[in-house]
Image (cartoon, rainbow, N blue to C red):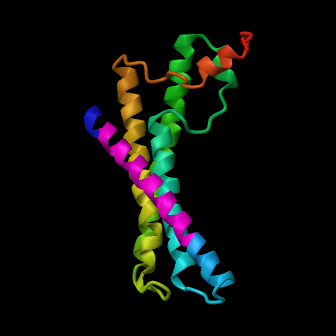
Amino acid sequence: MVRFLTLLCDWALYIAGAGLVVMTVIVFWQVFVRYILNWTNTWTEVTAVMLMSWFIFLGAAVGVRENYHLGFDVLLYALPKGGKKYLRSVSDIVVLGFSIGMIYYGTQLVRLSWAATMPALGIPEGLRYVPLVCGGILVALFSLERLALRFAGHDVDVDPHLDEALDLDQPKEV
């Protein structure tokens, strides 16, 4: 199961990266045709925003799995190692609850707006909210994975920035 979630995380990261590149090309094209050719495309802005939604929600899910999501860790550095496990578990439970809200309300948004059509693209309006649902599903899976691994005795709470913070105290040779 961990191998499958690793593969899923890698694919989410690749798709998010590709979406960022494609969005950058679309925005460049939009600026080029607007200011150089004095012409406007109707599809570029809507497409760029939809791609941005995809890479934001997929990237957030990857951040949850890889422990790179935003957090306020001051209390964690003051607690003994045993206390950190419980505080991070509470954090993962809160993230899981938030992801369930993303799935539930995102699904409602998709369902309620599916009948409308985006004029610029000719596709259902509900497709705007599919990234919210997919990102919520991935965040829920990755949060559950972190909780299960932690309680199985695995060290999933390694702080990727801790070594960098500790190295600041050491003088560097030039």
Residue 48 versus residue 168 in the image, above or below: below
Write the start and end of the magenta stretch as one range: 5-27
Taking the spot 50% from the left edge, 86% from the top edge, the residue there is: 120
Name the residue: 62% across, 77% down.
Answer: 32
Q: Nearer the viewer, residue 13 or 33?
A: 33
Q: Is residue 66 rendered to the left or right of residue 161? A: left
Rendered residue at 48%/36% (across/down):
93
Q: Position of residue 34 (x, y in %)?
A: 65, 83
Does residue 70 appear anywhere in the picture? yes
Residue 124: image quadrant is bottom left
Q: Position of residue 74 (x, y in %)?
A: 70, 24
Q: Quadrant of residue 10?
A: top left
- Queried whether the magenta region covers residue 13, the answer comes back as yes
Give the mark count: 0
Residue situated in front as seen by the camera: 78 or 2:
2
Query: Is 82 or 53 nearer to us in this picture?
Result: 53
Magenta-colored stretch includes residue 7:
yes
Q: Position of residue 142 (x, y in %)?
A: 40, 39
Q: Is residue 104 visible?
A: no
Task: Answer left or right for 88 relative to 114.
Answer: right
**Which residue sits at x=35%, y=28%?**
148
Does 14 appear above or below 131? above
Q: Quadrant of the N terminus?
A: top left
- Image quadrant of residue 38? bottom right
Q: Main secondary structure of the magenta part?
A: helix
Above or below, 59 relative to 86: below
Asked if residue 129 lies left or right of residue 49, the reply is left
Q: Quadrant of the C terminus?
A: top right
